[in-house]
Image: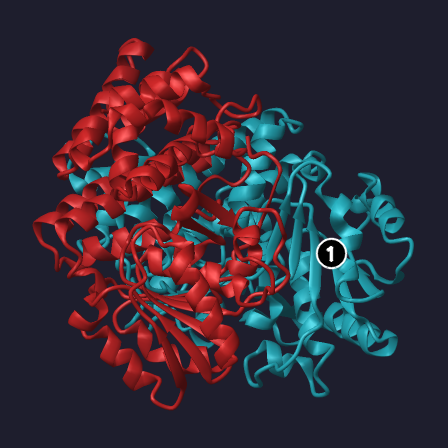
Chain colours: A red, B cyan
Amino acid sequence: MIGNFTYNTPTKLYFGKDAVKDLPAVVGKYGRNVLMTYGGGSIKKIGLYDRVKDLLKDFHIVELSGIEPNPKYDPSVLEGARLCKENDIDVILSVGGGSVLDCSKAISVCAKYDGEGWDLISGKVKATAAVPIVDIITLAATGSEYDMGCVISNTAINDKRGYLDELMYPVASFLDPEYTYSVNKWQTACGTADAINHVLEQFFASPHSMFNDGVMISALRSLMTNVKIALEDPNDYAARSELMYVCSWGCNGILANGAGYSGWPMHSIEHALSAYFDITHGAGLAIITPRWMQEILSEKTVERFVTLGTQLFGFDKNLPDSEIAQKVIDGFYAFFESIGIPMHLGELGVKAEAIDEMADHILENDNTNEPWMYAPIGKDALVRILTASM
Amino acid sequence: MIGNFTYNTPTKLYFGKDAVKDLPAVVGKYGRNVLMTYGGGSIKKIGLYDRVKDLLKDFHIVELSGIEPNPKYDPSVLEGARLCKENDIDVILSVGGGSVLDCSKAISVCAKYDGEGWDLISGKVKATAAVPIVDIITLAATGSEYDMGCVISNTAINDKRGYLDELMYPVASFLDPEYTYSVNKWQTACGTADAINHVLEQFFASPHSMFNDGVMISALRSLMTNVKIALEDPNDYAARSELMYVCSWGCNGILANGAGYSGWPMHSIEHALSAYFDITHGAGLAIITPRWMQEILSEKTVERFVTLGTQLFGFDKNLPDSEIAQKVIDGFYAFFESIGIPMHLGELGVKAEAIDEMADHILENDNTNEPWMYAPIGKDALVRILTASM
């Protein structure tokens, strides 16, 4: 069954080899004063920085560089908002991965707000305006290029928040798979793990439908197959193009319209982990995934595991449901391990002593135990998941 | 591989039980003068007419009723355009199936054009403005509620044209599966056949990708399974909701972004059939489908059949490719027959004498023999397909 929903993603996708050639026409619709945001030097190494500067040579470009992974409210968002206000910026051009884009989204609303920007991000105040965002995405991972969300860390208060607002849909996203050739094995694996988790957060929900199940299983199959090809041959266009396209479907709801909202519990857990230990988002999600699955496996949820087991992994449907479920959990563990993700949080620097405090933090900030959730998880369950993940 | 593409569907979907409750707020965004378009009396029988009039009691509503299946340029489009101009219409509200909506789309551009409207529809002149369109769709079939196309017949010159323009995307589409409970078996079967054909027109294209293949196969599986449930129990919400949702994915490209454009040859053939004999679109497509498949089966195309055979029909992948292909063709024939579609054009009133003229008409209007097409078909092939379909 397809339940009630509303859906609209207004972002226009420009996908493929040299898609960025249309950049001047697209950016020019919004004005000439551009805030160009980016991270470290990777866009310079791959020639994209020069290409953009050349394409936009007739524009006035202000730059904000050095945006960090797990982008920070202070300094990056605050600095970007200040630059927008001081330079009368018409459009933000985000060039990089999901972190740069998430930061740019937060900048876009904070730039149009006179109070403390964190009040918007933490949901205290509703934004009323935003600077339009165009992006060139260089990492297949978060799907931020096709959604209205961002995740911002506020290190001063150990907080990491997912923040949604329709104002933050990019007006246009450029996706050229060739710009992901230089993404290293670790980032390729972690980006794919992130996208796989986005699908799973939506797959474990209710009601289900034959169509959405098939779409999500197709997404998982494509991600799990093509990441192995891309790890083997980073310049395989077919694999990189599928990874890039499928990742962009991750977070805007289209994978599971009408399926209800699961609450994205694995993301709630991971946000605490990376707020406390600044670990790589996709790695954290990959490690949590099988442990979360083990915790929520029940008579109610086993049907979801059986669907994954038979349709994605091709397990024999005549096996007992519980056996299929266990094979699915073990299958994801083995898959993540096979693409090079260490499957223990300790290896990423997470300390077991922080588990109790993190569990409290998760419950306080993300309500993983609400009765409307597909599989609510309280303090004890959170502690078990985190402990098993160590 | 995902090839180059641009994609954007700006339409907002309002899906589910009583979704129309939001109609006043949505229509009100565009103004108070509404042209309400509909067909025969079916929307009155199901109570939708009264519901809309009650919801919009504070609006000024001009009505255009009697829009026919295979909507006609003259009188419907011309009359609608005249009403828009005379009444200073702010927004068109289409209430009905794909024919009413297609007609409304044509009206929306003709209302803003001072010359002969057929010049827009036949592609001679590019439209520059359109009246915004909101729709309530009452038939799961064409996907017109989520695309920028319409198909209009000009009986004076035996022509039926598919016409695309970004200006014609509905701004909002309301989809309540309960409004399809009263759709009879024939229309339910033909609407689903239409949607199945939309998927196949995109599946037989190049390049392919693992992800798109999976999405399209999921769409086909859902349509083929749920139509049987809906034919058995017309009030099965789960089945009606899947049919309605999947149909809406049919024509806006999202099923096969980056897959290249096949040219939609089966639609080209069917447009001639219904221009000459005013047959039901979905029935015509169902009859043509296996004959078209038989004609284009070749070393180049056999891989598409094998993918359908193994993934959709579950045929043994160890069988010879040619055998799988034949089983797929026979499988679609048997499926359409099983949902009550007579599999011979003669039974719909098509005359064999017209085949030669129709083949010429198709080549003249739709270019089914272009070298860029996935499987070009010339005059001889068209005659073979039509003859086999009799």
The answer to whether residue B39 is visible is no
Asked whether residue A358 appears in the rendered view, the answer is yes
Chain of the residue displaying label 1 = B
Q: Position of residue A102 (x, y in %)?
A: 41, 56
Q: Is residue B238 left or right of residue B358?
A: right
Q: Residue at x 67, y 75 (%)?
A: B130
Residue at 41 percent of width and 86 percent of height = A60
Residue at 33 percent across and 24 percent down: it is A355
Q: Report the front residue among B96 and B267.
A: B96
Q: Quadrant of residue A305?
A: top left
Quick check: B234 left or right of A34?
Answer: right
Q: Position of residue B307 (x, y in %)?
A: 26, 42
Q: Amino acid at mark 1?
A: Val
Report the front residue among A85 and A234.
A85
Q: Residue at x 26, y 51 (%)?
A: A243
Q: Is residue A39 above or below residue A294?
A: below
x then y, percent, for residue B272? 52, 65
Placement of the N terminus of chain B among the 4 image quadrants = bottom left
Of residue A343 and residue B167, the one placed in the foreground of this image is A343
Q: Up-down: is B332 above or below B355?
A: above
In the picture, measured across the screen, residue A141 lies left or right of residue B337, that is: left
Quick check: B35 left or right of B72? right
Q: Splitting the image into 4 quarters, where does residue B166 fall?
A: bottom right
Numbered circles on residues, count: 1
Where is B385 relative to A207, above or below?
below
Residue tagged 1: B26
Report crowding for label 1: few under 14, some 14 to 19, many 20 or more residues within 10 A (C-alpha): some
